[in-house]
Image: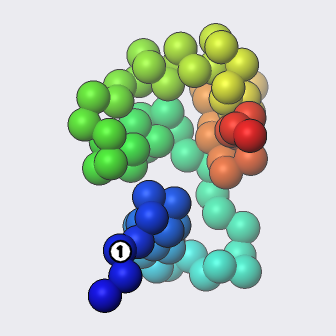
Amino acid sequence: MAIATTEEGARGRREAEHRRAGDSPSRPRKALTIGAVAKILSQEFDDISISKIRYLEDQKLLTPRRTQGGYRLYSQGSCRCA
C-alpha cells in the first residue's frame, strides 16, 4: 500500500470539497471569503487563523481580489507560491 504525499492528500481533500459543493473539475470555482479559507485550512493546519492569512497577504504571498466594499475574495490563483 502506497502512502500519499502531502500534495496528493491535499489535492484529494480539495477534490472532495468540490464534489460536496457540487462543483465539477471543468467548472470554475467560486471565490472564497477569508473566513471560508480559514475554515478549510483549519482541517489541515490546526493553528491557522484569519490574522495569519492577512499576514501572508502583507508578505505578498497571497493576493486576493477585492470587492468594491473592500472584502477579500480568494481563489486558487491568489497564492504566489513557487
Identified at 74% across, 40% down, the residue is 82
Q: Is residue 70 left or right of residue 6?
A: right
Indicate the position of residue 52 as horizontal and vertical percent values: 44, 19
Where 39 sits versus 30, above or below? above
* Viewer-side residue, 12 vs 1: 1
Residue sitting at 72 percent across and 80 percent down? 26
Q: Is residue 67 visible?
A: no
Q: Amino acid at mark 1?
A: Ile
Q: Which residue is mark 1?
A: 3
Residue at the (53%, 14%) spot, across then down: 55
Q: Quadrant of residue 71?
A: top right
Estimate the x, y position of residue 36 in percent, counting from the top left. 43, 43
Q: Could you say where residue 68 lies in the image, as x and y percent from the top left?
A: 74, 25
Which image quarter: residue 51?
top left
Q: Specify the farthest residue to the bottom.
A: 1
Residue drawn at x 72%, y 67% as measured from the top left: 28
